[in-house]
Amino acid sequence: MLNYILRRIFWMPILLLLVSLIVFFLGVYGPGDPVEVQLGNNFDEQSANRIREKMGLNDPFFIQWANYIGNALTGDFRESYVFKNRSVSELLLPKLIVSAKLNLISFGIALAVGIPLGFYAAINYGNPKDPLVVIFALIFYAMPVFFTAPFLILIFALQLDLVPVSGWGGIFDKRIILPALTIGIPGAAVFVRLIRSSMIEVLDTDYIKLARAKGVSENMVLWKHAFRNALLPVVTIMGFSLAGLFGGSLIVELLFGIPGIGRISLDSVYSRDYPVIMAIVLIGSSALVIANLIIDFVYTLIDPRIGME
C-alpha cells in the first residue's frame, strides 16, 4: 500500500507542472495585451515598453514560466491587471474562503441526506419504497438552480419569513441555509442514485449470498460487507466534490448576494485579467490533484487489494 501511495505522490508535482505550463501558455498567448488592459485609455508605446520590461514580458517564455511558478509556490500570483495595485492573492483569498464554507455545508447536506436515502432504497429493492425514493431523487436532480433558488426564497423567506433572503454572515449565520440547500439538494440526489445502484450490485454478489447462507446477521451483512464495498464508486464523487469546494457557484452566489469566487471568475474572463484567471485555474487544478491522491488513499483503506495491484 505504501508503494502505491508513494507512486501517486511522485506524479502529483509533475501533473501540476504540466497544468501550470498549459495555463501559463494560454495566459501569455491568449487574446488581448495585458499592458493595454492595465493602461486602458492612457496607452502609449513608451509606457507600454517600460511596463513590459518591468513585468518581464520581454523575457523568453520558459523564463517567464519558471519565474511565475517560483512566485506561485510562495503564494504570489502577481498583481491584477484590472484592480490596480491589488495582488491576486489579496483579491482571491477572502472569496475562496467564502465559497469553500458554502460548498462545505452544501456537501455535508448532500452526504447527510443522500447516503441514508440511497441505502434505504437499496435494502428496499423490489419494494414500492425504492422507486418512490428514486423518483424524488430524479425530480430534485433535474431541478435547475434558477428554479430551486427562487422557489426556496419564495417559500422560506417571503412566505414563512424564516430566513433572510441574501447576504453573507458565515457558516453559523441563517443566511447560509437557502444557498446551501440550493447546492446541496441536487448533490444529495446524486448520492442517492450512486449508493443505491452500488449497494444493489454488491448485495447480488456471491460473497454476500455466502455470508447470508452461513447465518451472518443481516446488520453485519449490510453494514460491514455490503456498505463498505458499495462506497468505492461513491468515494470518487466525494473526492471530486471536495475538490470543487473552492470552485464557487456563480448562479447561487449572484442570486443570494454571496461574495464568493464565482462572480470574480466571470468578471476576470470578460476583462481578460489573466493573473486572476491563471490563479483560479491553478488552485482548482491543485485541489483536483490532491483530491485524487486522497481518493487513492481512501480506496486502499476500503479495499486493501487495490494497494497490491
Image: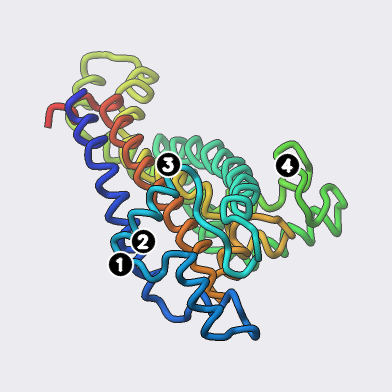
User: Which dot, 4 or 2, sits closer to the camera?
Assistant: 2
Whether pointer 2 and pointer 1 mark residues with C-beta atoms closer than 8 Å, the reply is: yes
Q: Position of residue 118 (x, y in %)?
A: 45, 41
Query: Which residue is identified by label 2?
Result: 64
Query: Which residue is identified by label 3?
Result: 238
Query: Which residue is identified by label 1?
Result: 60
CA gap, disc 3 and disc 1 = 41 Å
Q: Locate the C terminus and report the quarter of the image it occupies.
A: top left
Whether pointer 3 and pointer 1 mark residues with C-beta atoms closer than 8 Å, the reply is: no
What is the secondary structure assignment of the residue under circle 4? loop
Q: Residues within 10 Å of mark 2 (few under 14, many from 20)?
A: some
Q: Residues within 10 Å of mark 4 (few under 14, many from 20)?
A: few
Query: Which residue is identified by label 4?
Result: 170
Q: Is residue 17 left or right of residue 154?
A: left
Q: Residues within 10 Å of mark 1 (few under 14, many from 20)?
A: few
Tell me what residue is drawn at x 26 percent, y 35 percent.
Answer: 9
Tell me what residue is drawn at x 33 percent, y 42 percent.
Answer: 292
What is the secondary structure assignment of the residue under circle 3? helix
Q: Earlier in the sequence, mark 1 or mark 4?
A: 1
